[in-house]
Structure formats: structure tokens, C-alpha cells
Image (spheres, grey):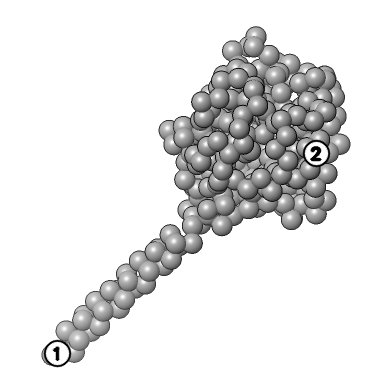
Amino acid sequence: MSGRNVYHRSRALVASALAFTAAAVGLWTGFGGSSTAHAAAAVPTPDHVVVVVFENHAYSQVIGSSSAPYINSLKTGGANLSQSYAETHPSQPNYFALFSGSTQGITDDSCYTPGFSSAPNLASELIAAGKTWGSYNETLPSQGSTTCSSGKYARKHNPWFGFSNVPTSSARTFAQFPTDYSTLPQVSFVVPNLCSDMHDCSVSSGDTWLKNNLGAYATWAKTHNSLLVVTFDEDNRLSGNRIPTVLYGQQVTAGSSSSTTFNHYDLLRTLEDMHGLPHAGNAASAKDITGIWTS
């Protein structure tokens, strides 16, 4: 065999070996779950995301309101989704929609049977991918408690208890929210109680609660590749279900705004794509939140 043929054969063998190696790596990544390398290019991959859900107020009741100076400061320093919408009424089905891409047949606020569904959801997807999830629930009697209500605590705002594929122990009390924010799960939800979430108390009360309890995290997120999302379950039934949604963090362009219409399914898809996850329910046909990121 000529030297030239040996050279070309050697190159072919090397190329084949490289192709096999790449395929093997692909298979290994698949076995190990989704990788952040697979996150959608249109959205960033924060180290930590905290989503806070407030209650029953329309966009115009919060954005631009003197009763919500802190939320409006987050808007100024972050991004405002000016056409953000909830899915339905009343509260509970919206929480299921945001968490699992479906209302899961829930149509009211009655107390459901814990673990009634095994449908995919944000937490189950994170866990399956080897990532971390948690919820922090104000006035929850104890970690993992499935009680329907206790004082100002209401389980109707906590959809994770509806899923058999989400450990109840991942539902923590808000007192367990860490002071070392680097120890937070990669994705977590914070659910204030019925006063702090503006359901029973004023916009001003909820705004002050947010500043006092998560203001330090927001400041930290700005310099630690992390994200705070402030949104609402539904409006006051008088504004077409248009709700406030504000995002704040290091990879959010300060002062940015999007007039694209987004809903709970779009927010869920965005959270999934940030971590290279599959899409639960209607998130599969939803779109990412774009146009507000620094890169």
C-alpha cells in the first residue's frame, strides 16, 4: 500500500474513532439526564432561580402603583412583562398550570387528595435530571405537611403536593429558606401566606414582605448568576387576567420590557429550557421568554 493510501486510511480510522467517542458521550449524557449544555440558546442558565407567586391582582394594581415601590424597583432594575396573563380562575388551577403545564382537571379551590397525579411537572423533571428543587411555604406547619390549611397557610397555593413524583419533604417551611443563598436549590418556589401574598392583605403589605424577606436574595442574585421571578396566580377578575410579572437578576437587562403576550405555560417552558429539561403538558407548545436577557 502506498504511503498516500496509508495516510488517508489512518485519517479515516481517526475520524471513525472520534465519531464513536462522540456517540458514546452522547449516550452517557442521555443516561445521566439532561445537561445544562442542552439548555435553549435563547435563555440563560442561572445557578439559582426563585419564583415568588402573589395573589389576585391585576397588572395596573401593582405596576406603576405607589403601593408597590419595591416590586417597581425590581421592574426598573430588571425586566417587566407588560402582557403577562394567567390561565383561568380561581387560584388553584393556575398554580397547577404554572407548575405542570396543565390544570390537571382542577377547576376550583377545594382541597385535593395529595399525590393524585403522576404527570410530569417542573420538580419531577428537575429531579429526574439530577438537579435540585424545593419549595418554601410561609406558615406551613412543618416540612412536608399535607394539611389543607393552618392559620394563614393554604395548600391550594401549593400544587407540588398533588404529585406522587414529587417528595413531600421537598416542601419546606419559609423559615427554612437559607441565609446562604448558594445553598438554595437550582429552582425553588416561594409561596407567601394568605396575608403576605396580597390575598387577604394589601398590595403594600405584600410588597413590604417581599422586600423584607427576599430583597437580600434579589441583591445577591444580581451578582451571582441567579434570578428572581415575581408573578401572580390571577388578576382581580376585572382586567382580562392580565397580571404583573417581573424578572430580576444578573442576566436580566436592566430596564428592559417585553410587550409579547406570555402566560404561565410560557414561564414554565422558560424555566425548563434554562436547565435543558423536557416540557410538561402545554409547555411543549409554549414559547420561551426572550428579549430581556443580557446575552
Quadrant including the N terminus:
bottom left
Please tell me whether residue 288 is drawn above or below residue 89 in the rendered image: below
> Upstream in the sequence, badge 1 or badge 2?
1
Q: Give residue 8's position: percent from left, percent from top.
A: 21, 80
Please tell me whether residue 270 is drawn above or below residue 57 in the rendered image: below
Q: Give residue 221's position: percent from left, percent from top.
A: 73, 47
| Distance between mark 1 and mark 2 Cα atoms | 80 Å
Question: 257 or 140, which lies in front?
Answer: 140
Q: Which mark is residue 2?
A: 1
Tell me the quarter of the picture where residue 100 sits.
top right
Dot 1 crowding, Cα within 10 Å, few <14, some 14–19, many 20+:
few
Q: Residue at x 53, y 27 (%)?
A: 103
Q: Give residue 214's position: percent from left, percent from top.
A: 80, 40
Report the residue marked by disc 2. Answer: 141
Tell me the quarter of the picture where residue 59 sits.
top right
- Residue 196 can be seen, yes or no: no
Q: Residue at x 82, y 25 (%)?
A: 195
Q: Amino acid at mark 2?
A: Pro
Which label sits in the foreground, 1 or 2? 2
